[in-house]
Image: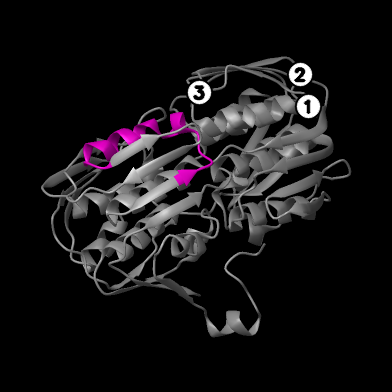
């Protein structure tokens, strides 16, 4: 496996353009399986998760062609039901969206239990509840999820989610667009990528209403047709560069963003003393001479996003005073704390609450990327630290950040990639695009 080698102590300056939203793309690509015709999808992020999903669709008989690095055409007209490749599906969490898309298209689905980052129990019980309500028989055994529509087609239903779940909301939406009758999802999640999925489905002929509120209504249609769609910018990628600018005391203009999607992140950054200036499609972030302590709690959108919690954890290590972070979504998202301790951070964790004693200088060390966002946090820590930081398991980072090293180096970071000898012999690159 390759490593990132970071020489810290440099400030980030310049302009960076944000890519398409990972969390939207990994649902939209499986949803393309429902479409009879060619889907042209623009602003696809060049990351390993999207590459894996496109490969899975190709294994199911879809024709996938690249118009450019960020634009693809998918034709699932002649796709057929078969077992999706196990080795690919187990690598990513978003494989569960194939339950909804395969059920909607074929009336049957067999997928692996989701893989991806491991930072606590993330059950799919709400996904299963939704599929059963739509008329599917669902069984989980041997690491696989088996689902079959009882009479070959799903039927609309009223579904109340016991817990706000982004994944379950999106999966049920995907399954319901071709179901017979009306489906109502209550206590639905409201994240921007849920709205983006609904807009994609509607552009292909679906009838989805209310996305972005806690009640989503889907009127089933007979079929979806081809069309073109552009994915929204990635709010978490944007937020990561915002924190990187603040942590290094730099000044970075972040473009191709939707400022409204970043309001929670911007508000917390301003509390640290960071200057955040909003423009129509850009945000200018200027790091302060001294970061101030903050308290934050992660919550479902429009609250503070859990995917930004590790990055802000690094920021609080650098801030003057004691900061408290409460994780309101996942049980075990503080595994990265042990890596920060190797760099000199003083942090105490009690369940879902972590207390960061700030104002201590971080120093370079050998650390691991525990998961996607924790990996991005370690990169920020390495840039803010003195000396050299080596980050292992960077495959997690490449699941969700397009050309991360290239973009950061263009802003003045000093990061190089050390490739595994076997990877070098086989000519592998950081991105499979």
The spot of residue 375 in percent (x, y) is 40, 59
Residue assigned mark 1:
153
Residue 292 in view, yes or no: yes
At numbered mark 1, what does the secondary structure look like: helix, strand or loop?
loop
Residue 382 falls in which quadrant of the image? bottom left
Residue at (29% x, 40% y) in the render: 275
Q: Earlier in the sequence, mark 1 or mark 2?
A: 1
Mark-to-mark CA distance, 2 and 3: 21 Å
Q: Main secondary structure of the magenta part?
A: helix
Q: Which region is colored magenta?
A: 254-274
Residue assigned mark 2:
180
Horizontal relation, residue 187 to residue 79: left or right:
left
Horizontal relation, residue 397 to residue 356: left or right:
right
Is residue 260 found inside the magenta-colored segment of the image?
yes
At numbered mark 2, what does the secondary structure look like: helix, strand or loop?
loop
Residue assigned mark 3:
188
Mark-to-mark CA distance, 1 and 2: 7 Å
Residue 299 in view, yes or no: no
The spot of residue 48 in percent (x, y) is 60, 58
The dot on residue 283 is none
Q: Are marks 2 and 3 in contact (CB under 8 Å)?
A: no
* Mark 3 nearby-residue class (10 Å; few <14, some 14–19, many ≥20): many
Question: From the viewer's perspective, is the residue at label 1 or at label 2 nearer?
Answer: 2
């Amino acid at each position: 496996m390759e490593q990132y080698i970071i020489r810290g102590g440099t400030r980030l300056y310049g302009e960076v353009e944000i890519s398409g939203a990972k969390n939207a793309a990994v649902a939209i690509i499986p949803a393309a399986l429902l479409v009879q015709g060619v889907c042209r999808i623009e602003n696809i992020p060049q990351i390993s998760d999207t590459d894996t999903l496109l490969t899975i669709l190709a294994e199911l008989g879809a024709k996938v062609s690249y118009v450019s690095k960020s634009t693809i055409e998918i034709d699932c007209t002649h796709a057929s039901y078969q077992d999706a490749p196990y080795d690919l599906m187990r690598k990513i969490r978003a494989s569960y969206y194939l339950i909804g898309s395969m059920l909607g298209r074929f009336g049957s689905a067999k997928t692996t239990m989701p893989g991806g980052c491991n930072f606590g129990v993330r059950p799919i019980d709400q996904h299963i509840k939704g599929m059963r309500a739509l008329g599917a028989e669902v069984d989980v055994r041997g690491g696989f999820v088996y689902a079959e529509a009882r009479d070959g087609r799903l039927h609309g239903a009223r579904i109340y989610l016991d817990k706000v779940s982004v994944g379950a909301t999106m999966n049920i939406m995907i399954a319901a667009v071709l179901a017979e009758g009306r489906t109502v999802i209550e206590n639905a999640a409201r994240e921007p990528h849920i709205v983006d999925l609904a807009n994609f489905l509607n552009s292909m002929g679906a009838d989805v209403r209310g996305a972005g509120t806690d009640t989503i209504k889907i009127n089933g249609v007979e079929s979806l047709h081809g069309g073109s769609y552009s994915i929204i910018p990635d709010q978490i990628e944007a937020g990561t560069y915002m924190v990187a600018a603040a942590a290094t005391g730099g000044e970075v203009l972040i473009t191709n963003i939707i400022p409204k999607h970043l309001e929670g992140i911007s508000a917390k950054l301003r509390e640290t003393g960071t200057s955040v200036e909003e423009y129509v499609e850009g945000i200018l972030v200027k790091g302060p001479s001294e970061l101030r302590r903050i308290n934050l709690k992660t919550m479902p959108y429009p609250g503070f996003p859990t995917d930004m919690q590790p990055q802000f954890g690094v920021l609080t290590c650098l801030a003057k005073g004691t900061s408290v972070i409460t994780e309101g979504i996942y049980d075990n998202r503080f595994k990265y704390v042990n890596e920060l301790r190797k760099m000199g951070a003083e942090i105490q964790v009690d369940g879902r609450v972590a207390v960061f004693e700030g104002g201590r200088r971080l120093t370079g060390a050998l650390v691991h990327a525990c998961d996607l966002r924790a990996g991005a946090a370690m990169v920020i820590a390495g840039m803010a630290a003195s000396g050299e930081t080596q980050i292992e398991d960077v495959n997690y980072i490449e699941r969700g950040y397009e050309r991360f090293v290239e973009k950061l180096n263009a802003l003045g970071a000093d990061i190089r990639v050390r490739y595994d000898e076997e990877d070098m012999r086989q000519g592998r690159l950081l991105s499979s695009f």
